[in-house]
Every structure is written in structure tokens, then in C-alpha cells.
């Protein structure tokens, strides 16, 4: 259940568990990543990567939300957390380089969304 607090400057809402975003990288197309050299004396290593990225908002701030007969507008600022889990990697270049040992990456960020809509008659 969401905890809501209305303030003169907008609305704060604790939203952990309300939604989850999932992105599947490298599933339909080749996603490439350049990493530091895995072979001494060689340049950077290019790998093909598949990973699953999961993010979930924790706190939401909505400073305004307006409506009229033919348009609406809102601004949302979300604090989110997430992680990216590599599922497979293959070396593209240089040939013969060892496959890297990839680990889960944790992330924290801020997402800003402005939504404006005009309704036609």
C-alpha cells in the first residue's frame, strides 16, 4: 500500500513494490560492450553481451498535475534502484581473448518524466 503525503510543493509517495521494469538486452539483437583489455599488450576487448536489467522506483515526487477540458500536464521525479545481471558473454575481438568474468551491477538513479497531453475534439 502506498504512503501518501501532500505538501504545498507537491506530493511525495513511497512506491516500492508498485511497479518493476525489466529489460532483456541481447535477446533479439547483438548488444556489444567494450571492456578494458583482458590480454596484456592488446587493446580493449569487444564482447557480445546478454543481460537482464531490473529496476524499481522507491520514492516518487509529483510537484504538479493539471487538467483542463482539452489538455493535461504532470511532472514526476522518481528515485529508483535496480540491478543488471549478465546471463552470457562472448568475445568478439581480439580473437582468442579469454571471456571476462562479469558480475551483477547495482544502480541507483533519478528518473524525471514530463507528460503533456492535448485532447482533440
Image: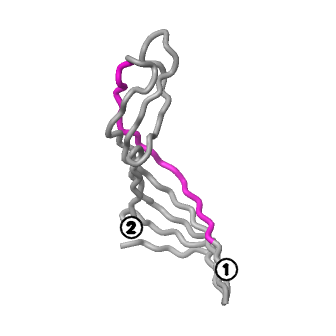
Residue displayed at 59% across by 63% down: 113
**Earlier sequence position, callout 2 versus callout 1:** 2
Examine the structure image and report whether residue 103 is included in the region drawn in magenta.
yes
91 in relation to 19, above or below: above
Q: Residue furthest left?
A: 87
Quadrant of the frame with the N terminus: bottom left
Quadrant of the frame with the C terminus: bottom right
Q: Residues within 10 Å of mark 2 (few under 14, many from 20)?
A: few
Q: Residue furthest top?
A: 41
The residue that disc 1 covers is: 118
**Scheme of colours in the image:** one colour
Q: CA distance from mark 2 to mark 1?
A: 27 Å
Q: Quadrant of residue 39?
A: top left
Residue displayed at 41% across by 18% down: 95
**Label placed on residue 95:** none
Residue range in magenta is 97-115
Amino acid at each position: 500500500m502506498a504512503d501518501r503525503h501532500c505538501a504545498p510543493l507537491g506530493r511525495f509517495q513511497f512506491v516500492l513494490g508498485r511497479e518493476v521494469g525489466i529489460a532483456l538486452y541481447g535477446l533479439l539483437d547483438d548488444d556489444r560492450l567494450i571492456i578494458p583489455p583482458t590480454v596484456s599488450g592488446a587493446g580493449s576487448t569487444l564482447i557480445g553481451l546478454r543481460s537482464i536489467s531490473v529496476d524499481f522506483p522507491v520514492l516518487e515526487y509529483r510537484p504538479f498535475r493539471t487538467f483542463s477540458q482539452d489538455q493535461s500536464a504532470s511532472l514526476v521525479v522518481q528515485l529508483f534502484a535496480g540491478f543488471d545481471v549478465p546471463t552470457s558473454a562472448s568475445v568478439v575481438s581480439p580473437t582468442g581473448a579469454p571471456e571476462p568474468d562479469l558480475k551483477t551491477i547495482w544502480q541507483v538513479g533519478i528518473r524525471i518524466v514530463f507528460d503533456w497531453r492535448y485532447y482533440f475534439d
